[in-house]
Image (spheres, rainbow, N blue to C red):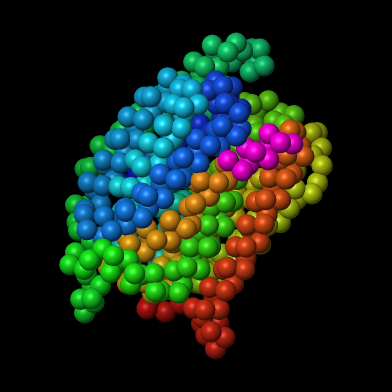
Amino acid sequence: MLGLIVAGEAVFLLPYYPTRFFRPTVLEIFELTNTELGAAQGIYGIMALFGYFLGGPLADRFPARNLLATSLWTTAAGGLYMATFPDFRGALALWGFFGLTTILLFWAALIRATREWGGRTTQGRAYGLLDGGRGLLGAISTSIAVWTFGLAFPDGYAAASFTEKQEALRVVIYGYTAVTAATGAFVWFVVKDGRPPVEPGLTAWKPQTEGVVTHIFRVMRIRAVWLQAIVILCAYVGYKGFENYSLFAVQGYGVDAVRAAELVTLAAWTRVLAPFAFGMLGDRYFASRMSAIAFVLLLASHLFFALTTPVPSFLWILFGNILVGAAAIYGLRGLYFALLEEAKVPAAVTGTTIGIVSVVGFTPDIFVAYLGGMLLDRSPGLLGHQHYFMFLASFAAGGVVASTALMRLLHPSNRQNRAPGPG
């Protein structure tokens, strides 16, 4: 499990962390607009869709260790190119490359291995532990990166030259690259070299002998799979929206880039506890029910930023609401794959199911950054951010509806008050 936790975070350090915690500097050094960076991240999402769809059947057929280690090493290779600060076309190619390396061989294998570890009755604990552990690694690595980044500017960020900012960002990227490559070696030695299980009595569901197309269509006939996909989609929009907080702190509350990175990094520490806490509650009160509650919190947080005017002297309001939103965002990450067991999806087709729900659920990788960049560039300053948070709030509302519908589908009224059974 430790190997899965470390791998699950390390593989996403390069495509996500520089733009999430150092976004103002990334825009300046790469010489990109918000829209252009969003387009590059959109290419990541397009390539990732192919990875999700094809990677699911791969995870049902091949050992997780081989898939995970190869993914980490190829992603680290992309980090070396990232440190050269490519232009817009290079950025498109780089994030497209990351879309394949981080998803095709990695994602379904990670989630399938976690489901196997969690057994039948503790799926919330398993996925909560996975994402909470990933959060701990991410918070530690980012805290170190932000601290190192800040050391490069003894006279303050505003007084730094372009070259100084460039070198500071390069050190951060090299650090993330080294962690990713080292994790690949760690995973190779600690993750079991086992093959996906075939459940006794489920001969019709044997992924090793059944045709891929037939296998996929069997999974697509499970109604709960589609509602789960919508839940993931709405939750992932919120997760992608978290990348905007540092820029919002700079443009809405007037803090500098280093201080903004520090505030968002502190909020990211909620990921250590929130997934595990929500996951444990999901084991007790159903993951679908706890998902609905998390979406309500996220909706309130986004609406607050969308409908209020920032008061720069009240940074505690900014930080407090970011904490609420982050707790809901990361809590959902400890819940939405626990829905696999709640919906009684056969374990032998876990990889394919993950691939299908991910194709729908992670489409925000294509459109959120791009549309968000357009909103921010079209209405510079506070107004653009308010439009962006209203956009995020609409998906949080959709998540409330989808989670509630899934809970009603899986647990009719005569079973609402029962705790989940082992089946």
Question: Quick check: 105 above or below 56?
Answer: above
- Image coordinates for residue 46, horizontal then vertical, percent: 44, 45
Q: Is residue 163 left or right of residue 350?
A: right
Q: In this view, does 244 lie above or below 353?
A: above
Q: Is residue 116 magenta?
A: no
Q: Quadrant of residue 313?
A: top right
Q: Residue at 45% of width from left, 51% of height from top?
A: 131
Q: In this view, does 334 lie above or below 139?
A: below
Q: Who's the residue at 73% across and 53% down the image? A: 303
Q: Is residue 147 in sight in this rendering?
A: no
Q: In the depicted view, which residue is nearer to us: 49 or 121?
A: 49
What is the total number of numbered labels drawn onto the structure image? 0
Task: Give the quarter of the figure containing the C terminus.
Answer: bottom left
Residue drawn at x 50%, y 35% as measured from the top left: 40
Residue sticking out furthest to the bottom = 414
Where does the magenta region start and end? Answer: 370-379
Residue 350 vs residue 282: left or right?
left
Q: In this view, does 246 lie above or below 225?
A: above
Which picture quadrant has residue 263?
A: top right
Closer to the camera, 277 or 204?
Answer: 204
Residue 191 on image: x %, y %: 25, 49
- Residue 156: x and y in percent read 65, 16
Judge whether residue 376 is colored magenta.
yes
- Examine the rendering and report whether any part of residue 402 can be seen: yes
Q: Is the magenta stretch mostly helix, strand or loop?
A: helix
Residue occupying image coordinates x 68% and y 54%: 393
Foreground residue among 314 and 74: 74
Q: Residue 201: x and y, percent?
A: 21, 79
